[in-house]
Image: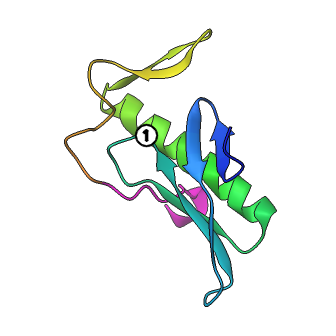
Amino acid sequence: MNNNLLSYKGFYGSVNFSAADEVFYGKVEGVHDLVSFEGATVKELKQDFQKAVEDYILFCKFDGLIQYSNQTGYSSAGSDCCSSKKYIVEPFSAAGH
């Protein structure tokens, strides 16, 4: 596995660093949607990645485009989840709603 990838629930996220902004950032790979995440530390980056994946899964479940299998992890029902749409999935915060 590539050392510059995070893995969570069958999803992979790229890892990059912006020296100018002093922040780690990435996006979930292998999906047709833009799902990004970031963090000032590696710990924050991993937490934001996992939160972005969880929010993406919820979003796709809401649209009826993803299903869960205990043996294979998450898979789309038909084509890739939300493949005809482009979204930036921001982590959900109960305090903000």
Q: Amino acid at mark 1?
A: Gly
Of 90 and 16, nearer the camera is 16
Residue 15 location (% of width, % of height): 62, 59
Q: Is residue 10 above or below residue 45?
A: above
Q: Residue at x 64, y 48 (%)?
A: 5
Residue that carries the numbered disc 1 in the rendered image: 30
Among the 4 quarters of the image, the one containing residue 8: top right
Of 19 and 44, nearer the camera is 19
Q: Is residue 68 above or below residue 57?
A: above
Residue 64 location (% of width, % of height): 31, 25
Q: Main secondary structure of the magenta part?
A: loop
Tell me if residue 30 is in the magenta stretch. no
Of 35 and 17, nearer the camera is 17
Of 22 and 93, nearer the camera is 22
Q: Residue at x 64, y 57 (%)?
A: 48
Is residue 91 toward the left or the right of residue 9 in the image?
left
Q: Quadrant of the N terminus?
A: top right
Residue 94 location (% of width, % of height): 58, 56
Furthest residue toward bottom: 20
Magenta range is: 87-97
Residue 37 location (% of width, % of height): 56, 61
